Structures are given as structure tokens and as C-alpha cells.
Amino acid sequence: MRARPYGLGFAFLGPSLVLLILFFFAPVLLTGVFAFTNMSTATGIGSGYYTVTPSLLRDLKAEGVGQAADELSQGAFVVSPETIEAARAAGVDGRFVDEIAAKLQGRSFENSSEFQRALKDLDSRPRAIRALKLAMDPFTASVLNVRYDTRDAAFSAISAAAPSLDADAVNTVVNRAYTGWVFTPSNFAALVSKPDTWRVVANTIAYVGATLAFNVLVGLFLAIATFYLPRSSASFFNALWLLPRITPVVLYAIMWKWFTWDTGFIAVIARDLGLPSFNYMKGSVASAWTIVILLNGFIGASFGMILFSGSLRAIPMQQLWASEVDGANRWQQITRIILPQMRWPILFVTSYQTLSLLSSYETIWLTTNGGPGNTTTVWALEAFRTALSNYTGNLQYGLGSAMALILVAVGLVLSIAYLFLFKFDDLISSPKIEF
């Protein structure tokens, strides 16, 4: 018996598997990993360092860690026995060090300019500014804006700068001073606590629900309506309704802007008729939602119409002829013959369109951009803005990934619910009657 060429089949599938792993599984895996990090533009995607900044000290004071903030914000330069010895060890001129010890010991200075002015009053100071600044380095006592590459170095420096702090307080400061990313579940807690989250959730439910109903019901209506038309007329209407689906999304958005803006077709007609004339795309919340749902609805309806039309053609015409002989009208044919046999395509279109609408944002972004205000902002658009495009420039990769991961989980739950709702087991079971 001749062996089957399994190796050749795997060879042909190999490139596809590689592409699938690189461009599907890897991004999904990375999204899941990033969702549990605080990764952002500020942290970068590599390892970070430790630095105490004035803004961090202000945050610590606002959070009740006032002692640490007060001690770490004190003088940037201190003349003490320890710093004097450090200056001698660093090779600073002995006479200059002796004069500093005699006249400035015990004093602290808040910044380099103040310390430099005090040193310029000393007779033995170096005349070159560069030499004077090098002599100042050993007297540096502040940890503000100093970069430490390791946690141990930051811990030691902060402990020395604020000796009254206990280990727990120092650890708190060190953790907050880290500029790199860390693993944390805080993204999900932040989403729950943000008041805008629930507004976006409500927007998403309204958008997906209304648009999905439009997609499925209008697509099904168009398919059934053209099914009863002559073949030539049906082909014409099918081609006409296919235009929203095949039109590039940017061109489609521009067309709707021309149609709805304050100088567009609707506004001009409304003005001529004495009706309210304004930017219907962004002028009011009601009109913006209407435009968003219709804009996406026509795209989805044309997709549903294509699939439903193909499924209708697969229904045996003998069943319809027999129903006519029995006296069935069009409505009875639709409700008792066509719709029961359309459960599978309706399930597919409903599931596909739900997942598509949950993850779609490009048409809203190109038209209303989530406005007016944020009233038409949906979850996918908010995730895109958070992770990839916002006005502040601080892209929050971790938080955006968490939002994307939630979308995946919601889509999975809804898909399973659809399988139960449409009785998927019955759809794939063997027919009870063999023809």
C-alpha cells in the first residue's frame, strides 16, 4: 500500500503556520502579557532605572508619605565631615577643602547655584569654572534627579539621604522611583474604578446592539425581498447594496461627511425646507448616534445580504412549490419554511458581526472621532486611543492591552451564548429524514 504524502502536505502548510504564529498567536500572547503590566511610553518596553523627581515627592506627600518627601527634598549640597572627606579622597585641592570646612561646615544648599556662589566667596577657590564644578560633586547629598541603575544603589542612596526612614518607607520610595515596567494587575482595577469606563461600556452595548440588529434584520429582509424578485432585478439590487461593503473605508467616511456636515447635502436640503440645519454628524448626540449606526449598519447589512441570499438559493424550490399548492402565502413561506432553514447562516452572521462590531472603531474614528465630546466613544476606540493614539503622548500599552483582552473575553462569552441560543448541537446533528 502506497504511503500518503503527509510530509508534502506539511511542507505546503509550513509557511502558513509560520505566518499564523508570527502575526496572530504572537500578538495575542503579547497582548495577554502586556495586559498585566504598567508598560507605557514613560516606562518604555525595556528595563528602567531608579530616579526620585520633584513630581514624585509631591505625589508621595499627597498620598500621606510626607516624612519621606520632606527629607528627600532637602538641600542638594551638604558640607559635613563625610562630604569633606569625600572631597579630599576625590583629589580636591587641600587648601580649598580646609577653607570649606572652616567657613561652610554644617551648612546645606538647595541648589548648585547657591552653593557655587558660596564657594566663589572663598579665597582658595579654583579660578576655572569647570574645576569649581568638579569640586562641588563630592558635596552632593540630594537624590533628586539622580539616576541609579540598580535597586540596591537607589536603596542605599535614599537611605543615606533620609536616615530617619525605616526600610518599608525606603522600599516604597524605591518602588515608586522605578521608571521601568513591572507586572501588576492594577490595570483591571483602574478600569473598574474609572467613571468613564461605565460610560464607554454603555456606549458599546448601545452601538453593538443597535448596529447588529440593523445588520441582521435589514440584511435578511433584503435577501428575502430580492429572492422573490426576477433574477435580473435581484442581481441589480444585490450589486447596488454591495457598494458599501466594497468601498474603501476612508472614501466611505468622506462620503458620509459630505452627506451630513453643516455644508453637506442633508444640511442644505434641511435649510431649504426650513428645518434645523447643522452638522448632523457631530452637532447633537442623537444625530451622531444615528449616523454612526447607519454608517456601520449599511456595511454589515450588505455582508448579511450576500450570505443570506446564497443560503436562500440552497433551499429546495420543491418545498416552496408544494407550499403554494397547499395554499401558503409569502409570509407563511418565510416564517415556516425559509426562516427555520436559515438558522445556521443567521447564527454565523450574528456571531461574526458581533465580534466585528466589538473590535471595530475605524469608521467612528474617521467620522465622529467619538464625539460630540465622548458620547460615541466605544470600547475598541478607547482602547486604541489609550494604547496607540492620544493627545498627551503618554501611550499606555498595558492599560490598552487590558482593554483589548477584555474584548476578547466578552467576544468568547457571546460566541458560546450564541451556540446555545441557536442550538448548535441540533444544527450539526445528522438529519432525522434522509432524502
Image (cartoon, grey):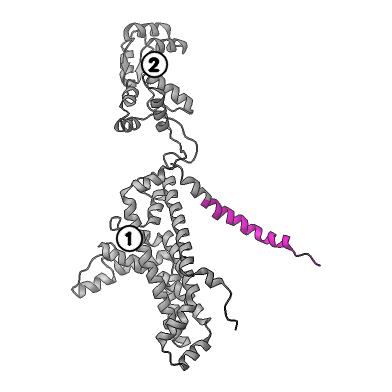
Q: Which secondary structure, mark 1?
A: loop
Q: Position of residue 431 (x, y in %)?
A: 57, 77
**CB under 8 Å between callouts 2 and 1?**
no
* Residue sitting at x 40%, y 85%: 331
Give whichever of 396, 110 is nearer the camera.
396
Amino acid type assigned to the residue bearing label 2 in the image: Phe
Taking the magenta stretch, the answer to whether it contains residue 3 is: yes
**Disc 2/disc 1 C-alpha distance (Å):** 58 Å
> Would residue 395 be visible to someone looking at this image?
no
Question: Mostly what secondary structure, the magenta segment?
Answer: helix
Q: Residue furthest right?
A: 1
Q: Earlier in the sequence, mark 2 or mark 1?
A: 2
Q: Which secondary structure, mark 2?
A: helix
Q: Residues within 10 Å of mark 1 (few under 14, many from 20)?
A: many
Give whichever of 366, 325 is nearer the camera.
325
Q: Residues within 10 Å of mark 2 (few under 14, many from 20)?
A: many
Q: Position of residue 30 (x, y in %)?
A: 51, 48
* Picture quadrant where residue 176 is located: top left
Where does the magenta region start and end? 1-28
Mark sitting on residue 139: 2
Q: Position of residue 408 (x, y in %)?
A: 46, 56
Q: Which residue is mark 1?
A: 368
Seen in the picture, residue 137 relative to 259 is either above or below; the reply is above
Seen in the picture, residue 171 relative to 128 is either above or below; the reply is below
